[in-house]
């Protein structure tokens, strides 16, 4: 009888195989359960601010989130997955409105290899602050010339928008009108959030450039018209003497090719001439949320470990996101040294190998005025 039962029992190799599979699946399910448990904990804390009442005339808080291409990558796909998995749920639980900007600029070298071009976040952040400084100068009573230039620039920008829209409608005739809708601008100053060391360095450098850099602004050039738009509608008629004359809407005769439009001269509006440095613009508070991107074959073992043991990542990233949800975690930055130190450990990751370290270049006067979110310590209300 026992011999008969023993024959039906699986062999040691089968037992070892199914035991290993059961152990791995069980470990993975336990990790998912614990990770979700940790995420629920931080989301529950974030709801404290979501349940706060605001006045009918008050504007809800909104932050501008920047994501640049992580070191070792050629796109923002994995960085966006990081944002959606660890940070977005906490923002949503705290009813924190946001604007997300993914900066992905690449170029092809002479040998055909593709590489990432840095500096996009820097330009965007700096230009936003410079625009507020320009508006301050334009509002002064004696600066009527600047107001005239602003009207001319806005008229040119409107014309360019119309030309771009006409071109897009020609290329996409079935485009929905909803795609053309633009959300109204935020009335206040949006705080800025950087995800990853590379984004953080560009962002704080952009804040400094925007606060103390040159305000001179180039009048935008007109968008070129398509060739068929330049030619306009051409009609042909026969005169009494039998000659063929081709006429365009502008009264040009045929058999003459339309001359190319002369190159428009570049004009720079000199705002610096009116800037006596007596005004200071409100700077956005800055927040750093880390992103330890594991790129390359050398990082495969760590990525496998994270797949089965993700609780530590949820704890770290969701906790940092929670500090941004609460305004009470803002504090003055401790000089340029603190701005340089945030996220520096990420430069030891495999993706940073053979990459030039990024340098924080912030004016000391800006660092003294800049406020940051203390994302490295858990001081949010609980």
Image (tube, rainbow, N blue to C red):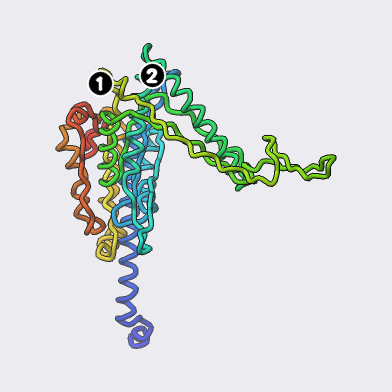
* Residue 358: x %, y % from top left: 22, 47
Q: Is residue 315 visible?
A: no
Instruction: Sort mark 1 into few (<14), some (14-19) or many (20+) by Cα contacts within 10 Å.
Output: few
- Identify the image quadrant of residue 111: bottom left
In terms of sequence position, does the residue under pointer 2 or pointer 1 come before the other?
2
- Identify the image quadrant of residue 232: top right
| Numbered circle sitting on residue 277 | 1
Q: Is residue 25 left or right of residue 238?
A: left
SS category of the residue bearing label 1: loop
Give the residue at mark 2.
138
Residue furthest out toward the top: 141
Q: Is residue 76 left or right of residue 347?
A: right
Number of marks present in the image shown: 2
Q: Is residue 22 above or below residue 138?
A: below
Question: The N terminus appears in which quarter of the rendering?
Answer: bottom left
Question: The C terminus appears in which quarter of the rendering?
Answer: top left
């Amino acid at each position: 009888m026992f011999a008969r039962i023993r024959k039906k029992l699986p062999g040691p190799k089968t037992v070892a195989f199914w035991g290993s599979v059961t152990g791995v699946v069980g470990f993975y399910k336990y990790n998912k359960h614990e990770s979700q448990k940790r995420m629920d904990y931080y989301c529950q804390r974030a709801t404290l601010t979501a349940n706060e009442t605001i006045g009918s005339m008050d504007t809800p808080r909104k932050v501008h989130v920047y994501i640049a291409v992580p070191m070792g990558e050629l796109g923002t796909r994995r960085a966006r997955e990081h944002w959606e998995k660890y940070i977005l749920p906490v923002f949503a639980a705290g009813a924190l409105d946001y604007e997300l900007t993914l900066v992905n600029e690449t170029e092809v070298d002479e040998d055909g290899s593709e590489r990432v071009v840095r500096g996009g976040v820097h330009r965007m952040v700096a230009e936003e602050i410079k625009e507020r400084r320009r508006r301050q100068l334009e509002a002064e009573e004696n600066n009527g010339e600047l107001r005239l230039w602003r009207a001319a620039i806005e008229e040119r920008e409107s014309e360019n928008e119309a030309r771009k829209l006409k071109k897009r409608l020609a290329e996409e005739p079935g485009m929905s009108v909803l795609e053309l809708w633009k959300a109204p601008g935020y009335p206040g100053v949006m705080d800025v959030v950087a995800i990853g060391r590379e984004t953080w360095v560009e962002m704080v450098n952009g804040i400094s450039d925007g606060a103390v850099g040159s305000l001179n602004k180039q009048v935008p050039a007109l968008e070129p018209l398509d060739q068929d738009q330049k030619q306009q509608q051409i009609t042909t008629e026969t005169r009494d003497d039998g000659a063929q004359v081709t006429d365009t809407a502008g009264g040009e005769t045929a058999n003459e090719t339309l001359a190319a439009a002369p190159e428009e001269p570049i004009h720079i509006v000199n705002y610096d001439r009116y800037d006596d440095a007596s005004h200071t613009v409100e700077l956005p508070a800055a927040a750093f949320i880390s992103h330890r991107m594991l790129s390359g074959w050398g990082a495969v073992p760590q990525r496998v470990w994270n797949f089965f043991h993700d609780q530590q990542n949820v704890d770290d990233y969701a906790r940092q996101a929670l500090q941004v949800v609460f305004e009470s975690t803002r504090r003055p930055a401790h000089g340029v040294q603190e701005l340089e130190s945030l996220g520096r450990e990420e430069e030891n990751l495999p993706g940073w190998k053979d990459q030039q370290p990024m340098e924080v270049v912030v004016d000391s006067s800006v660092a003294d005025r800049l406020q940051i979110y203390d994302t490295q310590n858990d001081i949010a209300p609980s």
